[in-house]
Amino acid sequence: MFKHKTMRGANSSPLDLSSLKKRALGHARTLHQALRPEERIRLEGVHARLAGDGGMVIVRYRTSKPLPGSGKGIAAHVLDQESGKRLNMLRIPIIGPLSSHPLTRRPTCEGYFVADNVDRHVVPGSKITVVVGDLMVEDVAVND
Amino acid sequence: MQRRRYRQRAQEAVDCTGERAVVPTELGAACGPVKLKNKILHFTLYATDGYMNLDSGAWPPVDDNTSIAGWGPSFVGPADAPDNNPIAPIPITGPVYVWGFTDIDPLTDFRDVPPGNHAPTGAVAPTRVGNAKVPAPYLECMHMDHVFITVYNRGMFLFENKPNAMQDDHSLHLHGIHAQTPYDGFPESAGSYTEQLRYFWEEPWYLALGDGQTPKSRDDAWNAKTLTQQLALLNAVPDAQKVIRDNNLNARGGIPNYLNQMDQPPLGVGNGSGGFIPEPQRSQVSQFTYYFTPLHHGTFMYHCHVSASEHVQMGMYGALIVRPMDYVMKNKNTWSVFGMKTNTSYDVEYTVILSEFDARWHLNIESDGALFGDYYAANWRPDIWMANGRTFPTTLLPFQWNPGTNPDINPAYYVEPRYNTYLKVGANKRMLIRYIQMGYQEHPMHQHGWMMRVVGKDAMPKVPQQEVFTLLIGSGETYDIITLANPAYGITSPAGSPLSMPTNPPDGPGTLNWRDLYPIHDHDDYRVTTNGIYLGGAALIMEVCPSPVGVPTNTPTFDDPYTGNVEPLPKLCPP
């Protein structure tokens, strides 16, 4: 019979694994910030374009190194700099979130996602901030 | 039996009154004098090469490796991987080398060879490439029109400096049209066909049509005229001013190549001493005019049939639509596939050409055999699946081909809304999708959201019509399917189940606000990828954009609190 093993700390009470995870993530962020600028992962080659008759924004991007977590599809969104409106990643029935990930699950340097612009906040020429995971790029012009 | 039923139906649709037929038609013989709608059309096409970045446009820039998701340096592998190894990844960067037809003379619309290409190097390195359009220009005509298509074989400019390589003949096969043998585009049976033809499109009055500069503008202006106007112009030309020349295929049954120095007349345009015969003979020899009268209406395609296995794979195909005689573009009530009384009417129309690329074959051609030198066509294995030459997410974009830089060419010639693949339909409206399979695989196209009604196959009415949710489309087939976007969930019925609980969703993922979006995709789901990147391939998105409707105030329930706090209707996109 499988017996669930619980990690126990010095006071013999079970440790909260989710908080451990959060601390690890925060530690990783700190580590990332501790890197020299040229060592950090950067968003490059970000292009944004209206699609779906103006109701969507396709964002394509490249990163300077394989982006951890990109193998499974990464959280991303867009901020309209003029209105402050957040455009979330578009999800459609069955398919789920419209973003790319390699079937090999290996982190990759490039990808895309589709943001939901159904309210047409973003128009050709709008400036947006693209957020991919922990990476961010501002002043990306949206093409038509 | 089906053909007889078709003819009966076609006769019913003909207006049997009016002017006497000057140009005799089959239906005229059966029906007496008919009101002529059988115009004389002319189209000009050029066969050449080019590059495409599967974005069908200048975005992203052609030297951007992200133009095709996965088509970049992160996918690397041995350049000399054996072509029968299905596992070895391929070093692919940048745009794809293609061959294709275009309606803009490449001699006026050259393109730069993009960075990251795999063209021959050294003394024979290319300095320019052609402007091939993939898919080829969208051609349409009416049932029983008289259609002339002049095809110039301008050659593959990537190998302009390597004259012994790759400068093939081309032809034009009108798939399903059943043209006469010399005009069927199958070189093995066309033989060295020759005839005297009146080239009215080269006469001075025709050259002054349109903007007077580009063949496409002249053809567009000519094709827009009524038959009465056309006949008046044709008949006004005195015999001495008519341009009458030979219209020849070469001994191989193909159109000679403008850049092939090796073939002398009658095979080609070489002069026997490493050069070319002079103009205008060089252009006149390296072209052929096809003629056909479509005997039935529906969805067809055209493609090159010289070494078809290779030329079709390289991208030489396009859509050819024949509309019924009662079709009037400005009157939506007349829009139908086979005629207004045939239960094939629609409100919005899309044409989707499915196809696939095996990158190794394109690289082998582009590098003139330096890459994948042992490529064997029987081991063909595609890694790119496309809808109208594009992969998701660019199937969400308005369609356009890569624009050129010549300011004398109308930029509208690089845009083709009839090839749009973002499928938008109003609630309770009928959407027609014309599927054309120009690749080599069968595609089980699965549509979410609604059944699709199969109303036509291979340009013949499907009787009885059939509703399906998955349609298997084989190579060389066409299907016409009509979807009625009714009921549209969330428009006539609010979202959620009777057990859904009211929530105050965050402004982010998980909100109950939703859009009426449904995918259409190949149900061989590995093909919904682009070189191993998901989501890609020929995935399409269909969106229902309803007209404003009232918001329901209550919902069907199982006696649960799903009232009052129900989420508002999905965000409504403009119809």
Image (tube, coloured by chain):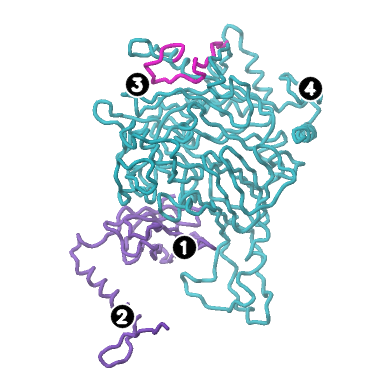
Q: Is residue B379 above or below residue B523?
A: above
Residue B254 drawn in magenta: yes
User: What is the C-alpha distance between the residues marked 2 and 1?
Assistant: 28 Å
User: What is the C-alpha distance between the residues marked 3 and 4?
Assistant: 52 Å
Seen as rendered, the residue at the extreme top is B240
Are the numbered discs 1 and 4 placed on the same chain, yes or no? Answer: no
Name the residue rendered at 40%, 64% in the picture: A77
Chain A tint as drawn: purple
Residues in magenta, as a range:
B242-267
What number is the disc on residue A20?
Answer: 2
- Which element type, helix, strand or loop, lies under badge 2? helix
Q: Residues within 10 Å of mark 2 (few under 14, many from 20)?
A: few
Name the residue rendered at 48%, 52% in the picture: B528
Q: Is residue B403 above or below residue B422?
A: above
Chain B tint as drawn: cyan
- Residue identified by numbered label 1: A97
Disc 3 sits on a residue from what chain? B
Name the residue rendered at 27%, 56% in the picture: A64
Q: Quadrant of residue B373?
A: top left
Residue type of the residue flagged with mark 4: Ala
- Residue identified by numbered label 4: B29
Are the numbered discs 1 and 3 placed on the same chain, yes or no? Answer: no
Marks 2 and 1 in Cβ contact (< 8 Å):
no
User: What is the C-alpha distance between the residues marked 1 and 3?
Assistant: 50 Å
Q: Is residue B202 left or right of residue A88?
A: right
Which is closer to the viewer, label 4 or label 2?
A: 2
- Which element type, helix, strand or loop, lies under badge 1? strand
Residue type of the residue flagged with mark 2: Leu
Disc 2 sits on a residue from what chain? A
Residue B166 drawn in magenta: no
In depth, the one of B30 and B145 nearer the eye is B30
